[in-house]
Image: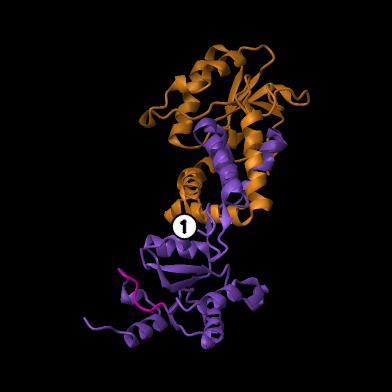
Chain colours: A orange, B purple
Amino acid sequence: MAGTAGPEIERLIQLLARLPGLGPRSARRAALHLIKKREALMTPLAGALQVAIDRIQVCKVCSNIDTQNPCTICTDRRRDPSTIVVVADVADLWALERAHATTGKYHVLGATLSPLDGVGPQDLTIDALVSRAHDSEVSEIILALNATVDGQTTAHYITDLLQEANVKVTRLAHGVPVGGELDYLDEGTLSAAMRQRTLF
Amino acid sequence: MAGTAGPEIERLIQLLARLPGLGPRSARRAALHLIKKREALMTPLAGALQVAIDRIQVCKVCSNIDTQNPCTICTDRRRDPSTIVVVADVADLWALERAHATTGKYHVLGATLSPLDGVGPQDLTIDALVSRAHDSEVSEIILALNATVDGQTTAHYITDLLQEANVKVTRLAHGVPVGGELDYLDEGTLSAAMRQRTLF
């Protein structure tokens, strides 16, 4: 609490504390930092949030977020329309884009299936994906989902649904992370890396 | 980077990354979280920031921040005007208020002296403190500064300046933190706790 500083500051702290990565203490520090940097940071941040509120939309094709709809990637003629990379979240799309990992297009599911958390197929954009997969232009669906139980459950579920579509369904390779040390890797990853070894 | 999502999102991420406690990765997560919770979080946060920009001021008496000036504490007639608790930062004031540690008033220096960082006496509100200390109403100045080199340097500097004022200058006790285990405490703290032992 910063009760003596008035309800306005208290409210700002409470809202900041709801951001992932900020707890109550760091939210107080962030609020103070903002107040001290009123011109250099607080005012620009308030403006950037308002721009985001006004302009950011969910792409009606792939569920990416962007200020245009369909999004920049869906409308980019240089992207390969025959490949759709399926990701759980926009954060994963951003990660793949940072890695320049694909020239294909994307499909954002919005989450992974998680019966324990009550996330079922109806909560994901799976219908739209199946519909896109039946487009004759599409030849490969790459499932770029987390190598977790929920991620792999989702991958199997989608693979089953895509049996009738005339597409190749692939998934990311398992293996040793670049720069990784074998001694620190779990046995499952090491076995997979051995099975999926490639010619040197 | 989230380069494919347009410059608006990129700018939001860059501004969030300048908050203490958020790095580039957590700033991306925070931006995505805000965008997903547009109504529940992003819009209220933009509003709270605008209110803070419009209304928060630095108290002309004690340099606390508040939406009124002089601040709530300075104008509170229930607070003891004979005691001034000197803190480096508003965050320290908030911490003491959460602990209900004092019924006195405050004086916020804005920082501690730090020759290495180029923070000199002219960067702190020391002149205003000395002026307040000469008020006949004031009888005790409590230096609630960090037990660090910079904090203690600042405490010594202020104590020297207050020699001519008719006030008692005190500082916080050193000792064992409540709930703390002796085995984990440094020797300096243990020695101080022993020297400053109190009757049981």
Q: Is residue B157 magenta?
A: no
Horizontal placement of A152 versus B12: left or right? left
* Residue bounds of the magenta highlight: B172-178
Dot 1 alpha-carbon crowd within 10 angstroms: few under 14, some 14 to 19, many 20 or more = some
Quarter of the figure with residue A130:
top right
Q: Is residue B174 magenta?
A: yes
| Residue identifier under label 1 | B72
Q: Quadrant of the C terminus of chain B?
A: bottom left
Horizontal placement of A11 versus B58: left or right? left
Comparing A143 with B63, the one in front is: B63
Q: Give the residue furthest to the front.
A: B136
Quarter of the figure with residue A55:
top right
Horizontal placement of A104 versus A117: left or right? right
Q: What's the residue at 58%, 44% (across, down)?
A: B49
Quarter of the figure with residue A91:
top right
Say what amino acid the circle numbered 1 marks: Thr
Comparing B109 with B118, the one in front is: B109
Indicate the chain on which mark 1 is placed: B
Residue A196, can we see it? no
Q: In the rendered view, would you say A110 is above or below A3?
A: above
